[in-house]
Amino acid sequence: MTNFPSTQSPYTPHTPADVEAMLLHLGFESIEDLFNIPPSLQFSDSFKIPPRSEHEIKTELKEIFDKNLPLVEFLGHGYYSHYIPSLVDHISDRSEFLTSYTQYQPEISQGFLQVLFEYQSLIVELTGLGIANSSMYDFATSIGEAALLSGRISPTRTTILVPDILRPERLSVLKNYTSNSGFKIESYPTRDSNTDIEKLENLFSNDVSMIYIESPNSHGALEESIKHISDMAHASGSLCCLGTDPIALSILEPPSSLGIDIVVGDASVLGLPNAYGMGVGLFACRSDYLRQVPGRLVGITKDATNRRAYTLTLQTREQHIRRERATSNICTNQAWVALRTAIHAAYLGPHGLINLAKQCIELPLELSSKLDTIEGVYAPLHSRHYFREFVVRTDKMAMEVVQSLETKGYAVSAIGDHELLICVTDTNASHIDAFVDAFKEVNS
């Protein structure tokens, strides 16, 4: 019989006696006999991780973290830092939020469900669209889900149009998402950080299922022809999808008024510190597509005593009962992060959200104006409206500038031989003047 450790693992609910009884009933001598793993795939070595105390592990991790350079980041690239009020941590860290799983049992999840309903309501109000789900994995998978939705709406169309400056990681996820759905992903040209309308016009055909546009885009520029693009899409029978975020939406014209069918993006710009990977996918669409929405929605109803109640609804996911009619293979979502988004938005209120958005426009304008006074520096590269980040051109090689700035304590990123992408928000705004001085020294 299997040799069991003297103490029961805290992660397994069965005692050694339980396990032996179950194995006996099944006719096996060991747990290993339950699995048919070829010897070539079995791991027979040890992980060579010596046991250490909590104090020893913390000390080692601190030594590793101390090797990180203490740089002031002006990086951007889809990951944005905004001040998170301490109230967001205090409320979201309550045990009923932090320890709960998916809210399948509404009778014990009313508080969490209500916050998710408020999150959905926030997204609906900002987008002007009729439906928002209770969040997705991240920005990139939201684009993928939008493409699949367009395919369900127009099953004979197989082309998705995306801008040629779409971030590589988002394009990669979109291609992966649609690889088995018969879609072709084609890029349309941009000029001076906006869509080249004349060239785009020639790309629409009766095979285009959806066009995807971003505002702000990967250069930080706001798209100035959204209504024109959506009109062209609808004239060809295509859907129009916009990528954005809640802070930008608070100050821009509602997507619904511009003819947008689907809005995707990253909602974690509210409620989540910059984590370079962690996020929460935003997904909203017209009410016509209610039955095609991926993931799940929180609905509101009344219980047997006529009190308001919340519950998960329209969960047409592949692991649920009606899996043959599933709209998505999303098996969970970023509910806790969406909860933080809702808390942060509620804390700011409409005026606070708009003021934050104004900073995202005014700070890049201030910084670019100061950088533009430096000889050999052109900021911003194109005459557009920018949100959080913008492109700078330097006479010096971009990587040379990046490396020189790093020695002075600043992190920026190169996006071309002579182009840099620079991001400024409320969290690094206090460093603007010192950053400009460093930039001036580097380019002298």
Image (tube, rainbow, N blue to C red):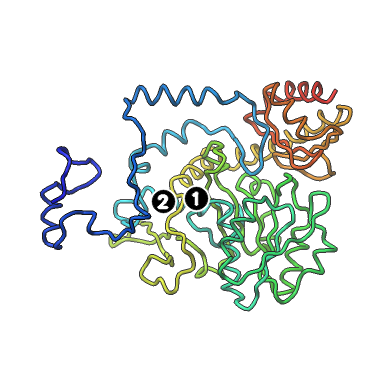
The answer to which quarter of the image holds residue 220 is: top right
Return the residue at label 1: 119
Above-or-below relation of 140 to 293: above
- Checking the image for residue 371, the label placed there is none
Other-residue count near label 2 (Cα within 10 Å), few / some / many at <14 / 14–19 / ≥20:
some
Residue 429 visible, this angle: yes
Q: Secondary structure at mark 2?
A: helix
- Amino acid at pointer 2: Gln
Q: Residue at x 82, y 61 (%)?
A: 197
In the depicted structure, whether residue 273 falls above or below residue 342 = above
Rendered view: 121 above or below 233 = above
* Above or below for 81 versus 25: above
Local secondary structure at mark 1: helix
Residue beneath the point at 42% across and 64% down = 315
CA distance for labels 2 and 1: 9 Å
- Quarter of image, res 69: top right
Percent from the top left, x then y, of residue 267? Answer: 56, 47
Q: Which residue is mark 2?
A: 114
Q: Where does residue 14 sit, x and y in percent of width and height? A: 17, 49
Q: Nearer the viewer, residue 115 or 15?
A: 15
Q: Position of residue 56 (x, y in %)?
A: 36, 22
Residue 314 shows in the view: no
- Looking at the picture, how far across and down is residue 117, in whole percent? 45, 53
Q: Which amino acid, by three-letter code, is at mark 1?
A: Tyr
- The residue located at (66%, 71%) in the rendering is 209
- Please say if the residues under marks 2 and 1 sit with CB atoms less than 8 Å apart: no
